[in-house]
Amino acid sequence: MSVTIVTQRLTATGVDYADLATHVRCHGPLPTADAAQIIDTVESSGLTGRGGAAFPTGRKLRTVAGNARRSGAVVIANGCEGEPASAKDRSLLLKAPHAVLDGITLAARAVRAERAYLCIHEDQSELRNTLRRAFSERVAAGTPDVDTAVVEVPNRYVASEESSLVHLLNGGPALPLYTPPRPFERGVRGRPTLVDNVETLGQLALVVRHGAAWFRTAGTPDAPGTALVTVAGAVAAPGVYEIGLGVSGADLLAVAGGPTEHLGAVLAGGYFGAWLRADRFAAAPISPRGLHAAGAAMGAGVFLALPAASCGLAETARVARYLADQSAKQCGPCLNGLPALADALAALAVRGGGRGPGTIAALSPYVVGRGACHHPDGAVRLIGSALTEFADDVRSHSERGPCQGLRRTPILPLPAKV
Ligand SMILES: Cc1cc2nc3c(=O)[nH]c(=O)nc-3n(C[C@H](O)[C@H](O)[C@H](O)COP(=O)(O)O)c2cc1C
Ligand code: SF4
């Protein structure tokens, strides 16, 4: 089947900032659909969450709406974009904030929420100003919106996990909560809480406007629609692109201008994702199912191209250390397991010697699935994929010590504070 590579839907206006008039001219007014129509349409569209786990959005809406029959619900739009390499949510909020604000209002209508929160990371004055401008345009136009507050969230990796956001909005620290209850059962002020990524909400608004059949005209039957992706690393035109799901990895790299040098691997799915050797990535379909079958993940749509001359083990070791430092250190796997895994990988990458792979293999089972949130699972997946995809490097580091790639400038970005 042929798949359209670049399809501009969320980014259709093509301007740097789509004010409300431009947004309505391009997409039409806010739909008047009722709760049942919204949920049915989103369910039939096959839209899945764009925040990392690709959970079916319609199913989540229906569950929260059912749980909220008596109490009413709360909506959280997750615009924190905790993945250091991701730029898609910020780019969407800066260019097309009304797409997301439409989605928040429609989702709130579907689950009968009278209150919504748009969560962003702190210290983003440009984004705050843009949102302020967008809200005032809506108030001036009399758009019937749900009452929405913008909330600033500490700039830490685990602070944007959904139960962390609920914890914060209930007056606690932005740390993951031990489960259950999950937010969709009992969240903000004890109410069932719908947490959706901001891109998901922007997509939801288009689905409700144009219908499920329209949504499915992009993408593939098992991965309908478009997705915003961030492509960076050794490509000629790094950036955020809107692609039809199901395109091949080779096409995705071509969209971003193509590789700037011979590639060894691509990190698919961000820091909770996995490495794929360049040839395997080129053939993989860019969709949650396609990447899962290849051994990686779609995650929040981050793709980082690594030159063959770089050291994938050293790159992964830096990120493993970052993930260990970012954990909330509330549970054993994060407190003890992640630092030990990061140490073992760093020793292999920087000093060489044969003990690292054995230590990692022995520790990993004690870390996976044992935290209150999925933070340690993501870190272990990334480290495990490095040992598999860079198996030749593991052997040569073990036998002959570190490689020349260590001298190259790192490709994987980390926040400046770390
Ligand atoms: C450690 C951690 C960090 C996360 N950070 C984000 C984030 O920055 N933005 C986001 O949308 N989802 C993030 N998620 C996923 C959220 O918990 C939640 O599943 C998501 O916001 C749901 O939206 P969706 O169904 O639209 O994808 C994170 C999950 C984990 C485990
Ligand atoms: S698993 Fe790690 S990040 Fe998640 S709650 Fe426990 S200590 Fe915090």
Image: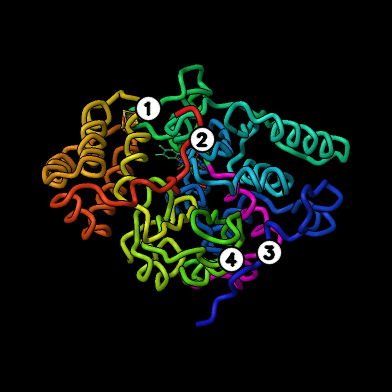
- Magenta stretch: helix, strand or loop mostly: helix
Distance from disc 3 to disc 1, alpha carbons, whole Å, reads 38 Å
Residue under pointer 1: 177
- Of marks 1 and 4, the one in the foreground: 4
Numbered disc 1: secondary structure: loop
> Label for residue 312?
none
Write down the region rendered in magenta.
Answer: 196-222
Decide which of 386, 139 is in the foreground and name it. Answer: 386
* Front residue (pair 31, 4): 4
Residue with the mark numbered 2: 193
Q: How far is disc 2 from disc 3 in space, using C-alphas? A: 31 Å
Element carrying mark 3: loop
Question: Tags 3 and 4 in contact by the CB under 8 Å rule?
Answer: no
Tell me if label 1 and label 4 are in contact, CB under 8 Å. no
Q: Earlier in the sequence, mark 3 or mark 1?
A: 3
In the picture of the structure, the residue carrying the numbered disc 3 is 8
The residue to which callout 4 is attached is: 257
Q: CA distance from mark 1 to mark 2?
A: 14 Å
Q: Where's residue 137, x and y in %?
A: 84, 38
The kind of residue tagged 3 is: Gln
Instruction: First in sequence, mark 2 or 4: give its number.
Output: 2
Judging from the image, the colouring scheme is rainbow
Which secondary structure lies at badge 4?
Answer: loop
Q: Check disc 4 and give the amino acid type.
A: Gly
Q: Is residue 98 above or below residue 244?
A: above
Q: Is 367 displayed left or right of 124 in the figure?
A: left
Does the numbered disc 1 mark a residue whose Cβ is under 8 Å from ligand 2?
yes
Cα–Cα span, label 3 and label 4:
18 Å
Q: Is 223 located above or below residue 28 in the figure?
A: below
